Amino acid sequence: MPLPQPAAQDDTLSELLKLINRQLTEKGLKIEKASAAVIDAAIEEGYIGKLHITPANAHECNHLSPLPEGIAKDTTVYADKGYDSKENRQHLKEHQLLDGIMRKAHRNRPLTEVQTKRNRYLSKTRYVVEQSFGTLHRKFRYARAAYFGLIKVNAQSHLKAMCLNLLKAANRLSVPVAA
């Protein structure tokens, strides 16, 4: 008695997606997969000053260049280890901005003691930015984009950033209650 053959896989959904993408491409439109937000936050206050939205499949370290535009010279630009590259450090130097990018260890080349201390020093300032990300995640449920496409995700990100800035402003204005 022969073994039953597995049923042919239903390709209806994948064919439908291909058809939609083909029709959008013919009209000059393109669907980007889920998008991620790269956020530049003002360090002193914790307010979000600029937003730069990139597709989720693009590495964010390649997108540092548009963020520091318009920042005053000799300002320290803080960034996490994902932005650690010679190109980004050179870009900051060309724009006369101070390097606050944390250093990243590489394979078979751990961080030196000086680099570790530098990262620890920078993290004491960067926590304000991370608090903003945490607030976006907790209070505004911004763990991931609710939409597909850069335009919609860009709009969603700007609205969430405005909400965060308004919340921070309201918290600064509120008077503490006497005990």
Image (spheres, rainbow, N blue to C red):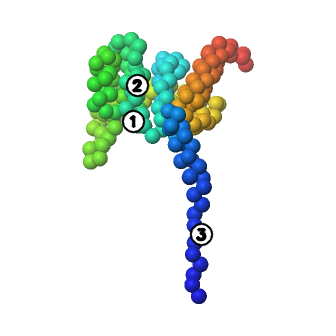
Q: Provide residue 132's location: percent of width, then percent of height.
A: 55, 27
Farthest residue toward the front?
A: 26
Q: Secondary structure at mark 3?
A: loop
| Quadrant containing the C terminus in the rendered view | top right
**Amino acid residing under circle 2:** Tyr
Query: Is label 2 or label 3 in front?
Result: 3
Residue drawn at x 60%, y 35% as measured from the top left = 147
| Quadrant containing the N terminus in the rendered view | bottom right
> Vertically, is 139 above or below 76?
below
Residue drawn at x 40%, y 29% as measured from the top left = 63
**Amino acid residing under circle 1:** Gly
Disc number at residue 7?
Answer: 3
Q: Relative to 158, is 124 on the left or the right?
A: left
**Amino acid residing under circle 3:** Ala
Crowding at dot 2, Cα within 10 Å, few <14 / some 14-19 / many 20+, comes out as many
- Residue linked to disc 2: 78
- Residue linked to disc 1: 82
Q: Relative to 10, is 103 on the left or the right?
A: left
Q: Provide residue 88's location: percent of width, then percent of height.
A: 32, 28
Place residue 3 in its image quadrant: bottom right
